[in-house]
Amino acid sequence: MVWKSCGYISLTKDEKKLKIVVKKEIFIADLNDVKAVLNGWLDYTEIFEPLEIKQ
């Protein structure tokens, strides 16, 4: 099986949230909640779509 990259994960500029980009779609997760899931303190955390800002 060959794996093909379809996105990336990075910190937001304020370093308080996790930015998840999959197939050019952006999603956000609270970094404290992600840490809690990884530590086993939470079963899951929600991932949000950022609201579009109209100019």
Image: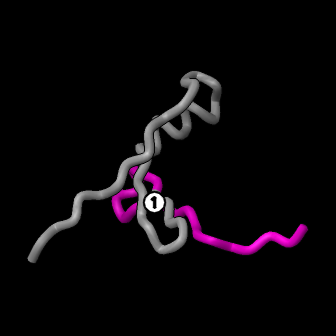
Residue at figure coordinates x 46%, y 54% from the top left: 18
Expressed as whole percent of the image width and height from the top left, the position of residue 35 reads 55, 37
Helix, strand or loop at disc 1? Answer: strand
Q: Nearer the viewer, residue 20 or 10?
A: 20
Residue 6, image quadrant: bottom right
**In magenta stretch: residue 3:** yes
**Is 22 situated left or right of 2 in this image?**
left
Question: What span is colored magenta in the figure?
Answer: 1-18
Instruction: Determine whether 33 is above or below 14 in the image.
Output: above
Residue 22, image quadrant: bottom right
Residue at figure coordinates x 58%, y 32% from the top left: 37
Q: Which residue is mark 1?
A: 19
Q: Quadrant of the N terminus?
A: bottom right
Expressed as whole percent of the image width and height from the top left, the position of residue 5 reads 69, 73
As drawn, the residue found furthest toward the left would be 55
Residue at figure coordinates x 9%, y 77% from the top left: 55
Residue at figure coordinates x 44%, y 38% from the top left: 46
